[in-house]
Amino acid sequence: MPILRDCVVLHGPDLVPHFCARFMWNRGVITAIDLGPPAPALDRGTLVVIPGLTNACTQLGDSPLADGAADLPPGAAAEQRARALAEIPPPAQFPHVAGHLAYLARTGVVRHIDFCEPGAEPARLLSAAAREAGVESILLGRLGVPAFTTGELAANVLALPEPARAELEAMLTEVDGFSTDGLTAPACEEARALATERQKLRALACPAPHFARALALFDPHLVAPLAAAGPDETAALVRAKKTAVLTPRAAAALGLPPPPLAALLRAGVPLLLGTGSAMLSSPNLFAELDFAWRLARQQSGPDTPVDPLAILRMATCNIHPVLRGHHHGWLENGLPADFTVLNFTSPHLRATRRLIAAIVSRVTPDDVLGTYRAGEPIWLAPQFNP
């Protein structure tokens, strides 16, 4: 039976660090966590076991286009992306997507939510690559052509056109849910009913037309990605008790204003974290955690510290209310053995006065020794032999 001894474990839904004499798992489930005293700080090197991370917003379909928008404004970047992807056949895309998925595992991620390219083929390609990498891929599809014109959205009275409904029905046979940012009120209700019938996830982009009403009619599991949110949108999210996904590095890469992370935290909006488009950012969730913590700290000001635990929760336990089931995002005896082992024996990590802050702001991919999903390693560093 596999075992780790004399380590530190982030335990329970509150992610409390404890010294741990014995951490064991078998047949995909955690079978023993022998906790010692709390370990908020470290003065010696050790292994640190954290929940396997969730990257809540990826777009790995544009993996072949890495850094293709580095010198383009947002509109030109979107046009370039569409043209370039249309010229790359799926077999040529596969190694790029598979490589990015392997990198997710390499950087401590056990699952991701991907906002797929329109159509069935991109979803099939991603599913095949995910099986190869061992990462759980939760796939959300999108309509290939907008269902409504700008004028029709403003009028807000038309039902879902038959071609769009047929496309949506076909899409839902291939994916775990779908995302939209441009539906009328009647179309929102139709799409919600169809997704509920098929037991599929729903994501709503923000800002969307009639945002507060769309939240009520579409009842999304996620608002993603949340590129911008003023007081009205934030208040609507709080009233609706909806979870929002942020991708702050992607916004920065396009020169766009950052999401109001500190304000959302103060308002109590449940938040998740993602890396967004692979064309804009590497799918390195530790880099995203670091960027998000510093952004929140900057936005809140020097006299109002931001708890790094709130940022870590965005990549761990905040996923449970959204996906439920076996997707917990924390570690307890009897729960799925989805965890990541970090090497806190390296010089830049072995002594820290705030362990959670070190995980959020100092860990790099080189510090990941192993990533386990359902008890099976999907990444092991060459020097790691538990």
Image (tube, rainbow, N blue to C red):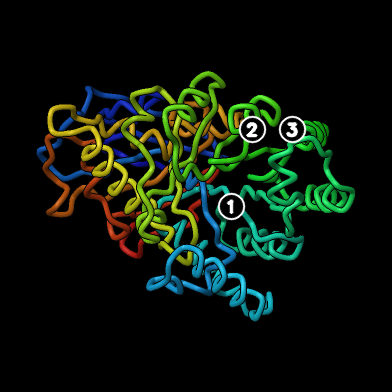
Query: Height in image: 209 above or below 104?
Result: above
Residue 137: numbered disc: none
Residue type at numbered disc 2: Pro
What kind of element bears circle 1?
A: strand
Q: Mark number for residue 185?
A: 3
Question: Dot 3: within a 10 Å radius of its alpha carbon, few (fewer than 14), some, or many (20 or more) residues?
Answer: many
Q: Residues within 10 Å of mark 2 (few under 14, many from 20)?
A: many
Gap in Å between the C-alphas at discs 3 and 1? 25 Å
Q: Earlier in the sequence, mark 2 or mark 1?
A: 1
Image point 46% across, 57% down: which residue?
104
Q: CA distance from mark 3 to mark 2?
A: 14 Å
- Circle on res. 114: 1
In which quadrant of the rendered view does residue 216 lie? top right
Q: Nearer the viewer, mark 2 or mark 1?
A: 2
Q: Residue at x 36, y 37 (%)?
A: 260
Residue 326 on image: x %, y %: 59, 32
Give coordinates of residue 297: x percent, y percent: 22, 37
Residue sitting farthest toward the top: 239
- Residue located 44% across and 42% down the image: 228
Residue 266 at least partly seen: yes
Query: Mark 3: which secondary structure?
Result: helix
- Comparing 123 with 130, the one in front is 123
- Please tell me which of labels 3 and 1 falls first in the chain: 1
Q: Where does the image place residue 89, in percent across and percent down from the top left?
A: 68, 79
**Left or right of 83, for residue 345:** left
Circle 1: residue type: Asp
Residue 269, located in which quarter of the rendered image?
top left
Three-letter residue code for mark 3: Ala
Q: Position of residue 215 (x, y in %)?
A: 62, 29
Circle 3 or circle 1, nearest the eye = 3
Q: Which residue is mark 2?
A: 220
